[in-house]
Amino acid sequence: MSPASTGASTSVDAVSPALLPDADTRLTPGGPGYRRMSFALFLAGVATFALLYSTQALLPLISGEFGVAAGEASWTVAAATGGLALFVLPMSALSERFGRRTVMTASLAVAVGVGLLVPLAPSIGVLVVLRAVQGAALAGLPASATAYLAEEVRPQALVTAIGLFVAGNSVGGMSGRLITGWVAQEWGWRVALASVGVIAVACAVAFRLLLPAPRHFRPGSLRPRVLLGTVRDHLGDPLLRRLYAIGALFMTVFGGVYTVIGYRLTEAPFSLPQGIVGSVFLVYLVGTVSASTAGRLVGRLGRRGALYLAGGTTAAGLLLTLAASLPLVLLGLVLITAGFFAGHAVASSAVGKAATHGRAQAAALYQSAYYIGSSVGSTVGAAAFHAGGWAGTVTVGILAVLGVVTITVAGSRAARVAARSAPVAAH
């Protein structure tokens, strides 16, 4: 792919009218540049999730060193995801003006720099503040990546391309927790966090070298009135509102489960060592598969059918984790992970298709809701664990899944009403 000047279209279809379908220069599987693009964004996803959730598997050790309870230690996760949720919309606006690749590169650079400072935190308060800054820096990645894909990839390949980016998230989440678990067991949580920072630096450098220059980017406006008008349009769209809520609820389950699971597995009846607890996150590989195959799932079942399946799988996994048997708990985590990543890939790709303009803002609103869900899941899940044990955390997750199903049912009804009224409107 030849280099092109920085610039982004706010619509996936913003290609010159002179380009006929057979002359479409957007990327497609098997075409030039597609593999480089996929691998670059895969690495960005790895770095994002490895940094964002780097403290999650280490919470019992952090609690021990600073003498704080699970709820307070969980703020090292919630602060990062909350910072991302708050800054993802402003970052998306910057990407409309300065380019997706530029913003993603700057975000990764700041995030990995902070990541190298995090292990030096002298107190839980400083650690939480650094994590909040790191999350805010990472806010430039998710929405910009989704917008980049919507502009640079042909529509029929969009779900698969976003699925690969989400798969990178799952690999980053898994490898970060796996590495920190074993490193922390030998050298402590500070060295473990430093190791994640070094890995993220390598991913950031490779990402910048590999990602093709955008060819369909046109700078947008930074005027607050234009931005607020776009946000108002998206929030006024019933379909987008449902997708935002679904993303938030799926992440509430996931954030709660994986924030608390370390405490459960290090306590009786399991009493696992830190390295083994970190290895439990190998189940993220299941998420890699389910996210990357989301396109085929939608092709067979439709979007709502895929969401029903993802929600049912997640609920079944939550119930299995109530068992006192380690194999059943692990199987439950596998199902939760598969259901979550499939549901997330389906919902996030649907946002890219549903938004007819301001795709970066549409994706940013989804990511904001998604990470608010993570923060809520982390804090509420930890509080529920403190109050009622693991059953309390599972209850929070089941309620969130019921929310997903309820919203999807409402969407199905709305679609049927719209279909019945369409012929009438045509007359």
Image (spheres, rainbow, N blue to C red):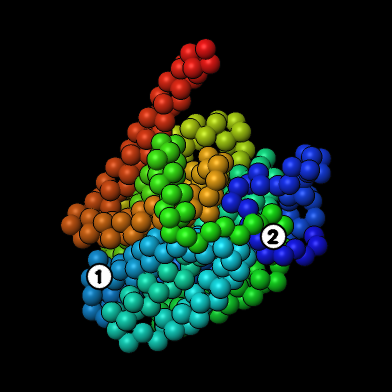
* Nearer to the camera, 92 or 185: 92
Do we see residue 55 in this rendering?
A: yes
Q: Position of residue 150 (x, y in %)?
A: 62, 49
Q: Is disc 1 placed on a helix, strand or loop?
A: helix
Q: Please name the residue that numbered disc 2 is placed on.
A: 214
Q: Position of residue 27 (x, y in %)?
A: 73, 51
Q: Who's the residue at 53% across and 43% down the image? A: 355
Q: Residues within 10 Å of mark 1 (few under 14, many from 20)?
A: some
Q: Who's the residue at 25% across and 50% down the image? A: 391
* Nearer to the camera, 377 or 420: 420
Do we see residue 174 in this rendering?
A: no
Which of the two discs, 2 and 1, labels the residue nearer the N terminus?
A: 1
The CA span between labels 2 and 1 is 42 Å
* Nearer to the camera, 25 or 205: 25
Q: Which mark is residue 328?
A: none
Q: Please name the residue that numbered disc 1 is placed on.
A: 72
Q: Residues within 10 Å of mark 2 (few under 14, many from 20)?
A: many
Give the side of residue 389 with respect to residue 221, left or right. Answer: left
Which quadrant would residue 409 be assigned to in this image?
Answer: top left
Instruction: Indicate the quadrant containing the N terminus: top left, top right, bottom left or bottom right.
Output: bottom right
Give the side of residue 32 with respect to residue 205, left or right. Answer: right
Which quadrant would residue 259 be assigned to in this image?
Answer: bottom left
Query: What amino acid type is highlighted by mark number 1?
Result: Glu
The answer to whether the residues at label 2 and label 1 have Cβ atoms under 8 Å apart is no
Query: In the rendered view, would you say 162 is above or below 401?
Result: below
Q: Is disc 2 placed on a helix, strand or loop?
A: loop
Give the side of residue 127 with respect to residue 214, left or right. Answer: left
Of all residues, the one furthest to the left in this rendering is 387
Query: In the rendered view, would you say 21 is above or below 212?
Result: above
Which mark is in front, 2 or 1? 2
Query: What amino acid type is highlighted by mark number 2?
Result: Pro
